[in-house]
Image: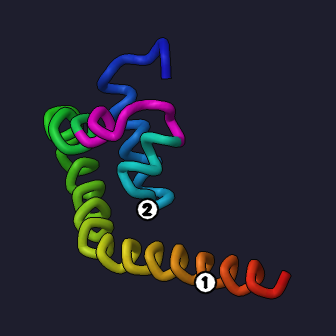
Amino acid sequence: MKGISIEERAVKLAHYIIETKETVRSTARTFGISKSTVHKDVSERLVKINPSLAKEVRKILDENKSERHIRGGMATKLKYSQMHQNKKYNLNI
């Protein structure tokens, strides 16, 4: 995201999050910047640049936050399911 201003970056990140409903972490990964930068851009800077856009992003961030325990539980279930599969196959050799 080199060559664009901080304001442009904040707006671009906001539009991306609104369109994809991605988390701050995955947005950061996509754009190659830190999650702290993404969070600061869309939570603090965007409010001063475009308050209505900031409000839209806030809805998605709040939704993602309310669902993170579910995603975490699913990730844990998948991890142990895969471990169980690997253990099962190793015993049959």
Q: Amino acid at mark 1?
A: His
19 to the left or right of 38: right
The mark lying in front, picked from 2 and 1, is 1
Residue found 43% across the figure and 37% down from its top: 12
In the rendered structure, the answer to whether residue 87 lies left or right of residue 45 reads right
Residue 9 location, quadrant:
top left
The image's mark for residue 84 is 1
Bounds of the magenta span?
Answer: 30-39
- Above or below residue 64? Residue 34 is above
Question: For the view shown, which residue lies furthest in the right direction?
Answer: 93
Distance CA(mark 2)–CA(mark 1) = 32 Å
Labels 2 and 1: the sequence-earlier one: 2
Residue drawn 48% across the image and 57% down it: 19
Q: Is residue 90 above or below residue 43?
A: below
Q: Position of residue 53 (x, y in %)?
A: 28, 49
**Secondary structure mainly formed by the magenta segment:** helix
